[in-house]
Image (cartoon, coloured by chain):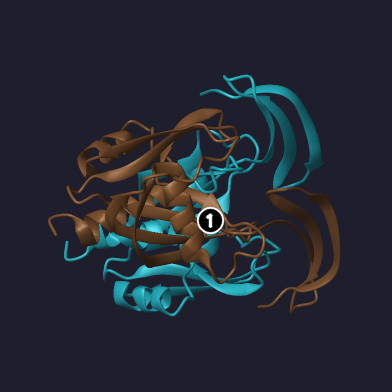
Chain colours: A cyan, B brown
Amino acid sequence: MEEKTLKRDLVFQGRIFDVAVDQVSFPNGGQSSRELIFHKGAVAILAVTPDQKIIMVKQYRKAIEKVSYEIPAGKLELGETGSEKEAALRELEEETAYTGQLDLLYEFYTAIGFCNEKIKLYLARDLTKVENPRPQDEDEFIEVLELSYEDCMTLVETGQIEDAKTIIALQYYALHLANA
Amino acid sequence: MEEKTLKRDLVFQGRIFDVAVDQVSFPNGGQSSRELIFHKGAVAILAVTPDQKIIMVKQYRKAIEKVSYEIPAGKLELGETGSEKEAALRELEEETAYTGQLDLLYEFYTAIGFCNEKIKLYLARDLTKVENPRPQDEDEFIEVLELSYEDCMTLVETGQIEDAKTIIALQYYALHLANA
C-alpha cells in the first residue's frame, strides 16, 4: 500500500507548520500528488476538579472566525519530543493555573488525510492551584471555566463545542469517569 | 475576544486546501500573525452492520507515512455544501459498496487551532450492499474490513487506530450502541 515519494516541493515554512506537495507513486505504477501539512504536535488535557468539574478554555479561533470552548491544549515546542507530559503540565499551568497528576489517555492524528499533527491527550486529576503560575502566551486571550459534564454537553448541543479533541475528552469522561 | 484581520497573504492554493498568513489585531491593541489552512470540509461514517460489525477502511496515509485503519470518510467536493448527507452516502458506497440510513451524530473541527476543516460524522444503519457500486477514486487504494468493537479496540491499543474521527466514532459506539 505504501506510496513512494518521487519528489517533494516545500511550498511554505511557518512557525506553526510547513506545507509540502509530494509527487508519489503507487504499487500499481500510478502517480498522484499529495498536499501535506507538517506540524510539531500538541498536547491536550482533560482536567477534572475534585468536585467533578471539567476545566474548559474559551477563546477566539481565527481559522473558524468564532469563539470556541475547548479543553486546555498547546503546541509542542521544538525539542519537546519525549517530554510531552512536561509540556502538558506547562500548558495546564499557563492556561488554568492548576497542576495535577497526569495520565496519558489517547494519542491521535487530528487530520490524518493531509496533516501529521498528533495530539497526546492526558487526564489530569488531584488538581491543585499553583501559587505563581507561568504567564499565558502573549498572543493568547482565554477565559477559564469549570463546568459540569451536563453543562459541557449543552455546549455541544448548541454548537459552541465543535472541537474534535474536546469531544474525545468528553466522551472519555462519559465512558470512564461519570458516576465514578 | 475577536481578532481583526489587518492583512491576509495567501501563500498556497491547492486542490485539497489553501494556506494563508493573516496579520491580526487583538482587542488590547496587540498584533500577531496566524497561519491558517482552509479546507472544504469532509464527511465520515460510523457504519454498523446488522450483526454489529463496524466497517473500517485500511489505507496508506502519506502525511504520517503509515498504514491506518479508519472509518470511511471523504472530502466534500466544491458545491456540496448543504448536501453533506449525499456526500456521505457517496463515500460509503464508493469505499464499502454499502448504502444505508444515515443520521448526523456530530460535527467537529479537526484541528481548530489552525485549520477550518469540519467533519460531519454520520451513523449508517440498515446497511445493504449496492449491486453496481460507484468506483473508488483513482488515487485511493483501500481495503475494507468488518470488525467487532473489541477488534477495533485492539487496534486502538496497538496504535493501528490513531485517527481522531475514528476514536470519536468508536467512543460513540461504546456509549450509545454497544449492547443495544
Rendered residue at 17%/61% (across/down): A180
Query: Numbered disc 1: what chain?
Result: B
- Residue furthest to the front: B132
Give left or right: position of A11 versus B105.
right
Give left or right: position of B144 versus A36.
left
For the N terminus of chain B, which image quadrant? Answer: bottom right
| Amino acid type at mark 1 | Thr
Rendered residue at 62%/40% (across/down): A40
Q: Height in image: B5 above or below B162?
A: below
Where residue A16 appears, as percent x and y from the top left, is 70, 48
**In front of the other: A78 or B163:** B163
Look at mark 1 in the image and give the residue it sits on.
B110
The kind of secondary structure element at disc 1 is loop
Picture quarter containing residue A98? bottom left
Where residue B163 appears, as percent x and y from the top left, is 44, 44
**In front of the other: B6 or B131:** B131
Picture quarter containing residue B20? bottom right
Where residue B171 appears, as percent x and y from the top left, is 30, 54
